Image: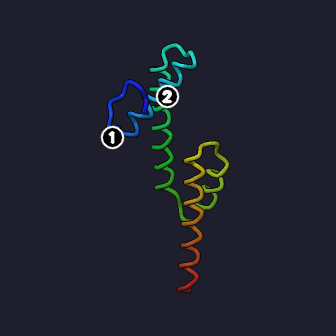
Amino acid sequence: MVSGMGEGIVPIAEFERAFLIKLLSNAGVKNPHDLVERFIAEREAYCERLLVRLRRADQRSIPELAEKLACSPNLLDRALSLWLMDKARRELIHRALYV
C-alpha cells in the first residue's frame, strides 16, 4: 500500500497515480504531480487512438497491426498483439472448417 492512502480497496487509477507520484518524489523530481498527470493523459489519448484504429481495421490487416504492436516496448501493446494474433488464427481456422 502506498503510504498516505487509506486502507481497503483503492481504484487502480488512484493507486497508480499515488504510486508514480511517490516514486518520482523519492527520486528527487520537482513537481511530480504535473509529470504524472501529463503521462496519464498522454497514455489515455494513445489508448483512445489505438481503439479507434482497431475499430476501423479490416480483418485482413489485423495480423499486420499485431506485428507492429509486438515490436512496441509497451507490455500492454505486446499483450494486445498476442491476443490479436490468436484471434486471427482462430478465425482463419474457423473459416477453413466451413469452406
Residue name at image x 49 percent, y 36 percent? 43
Tag 2: amino acid: Leu
Left or right: residue 1 compared with residue 29:
left
Residue name at image x 47 percent, y 37 percent? 45
Q: Position of residue 33 (x, y in %)?
A: 45, 20
Q: Position of residue 6 (x, y in %)?
A: 32, 30
Residue that badge 2 annotates: 20
- Judged from the image, the secondary structure of the residue bearing numbered disc 2 is helix
The picture quadrant where one finds residue 7 is top left
Residue that badge 1 annotates: 9
Q: Position of residue 79 (x, y in %)?
A: 57, 53
Q: CB of mark 1 within 8 Å of CB of mark 2? A: no
Q: CA distance from mark 1 to mark 2?
A: 18 Å
Residue name at image x 41 percent, y 26 percent? 3
Q: Which mark is residue 17?
A: none
**Upstream in the sequence, badge 1 or badge 2?**
1
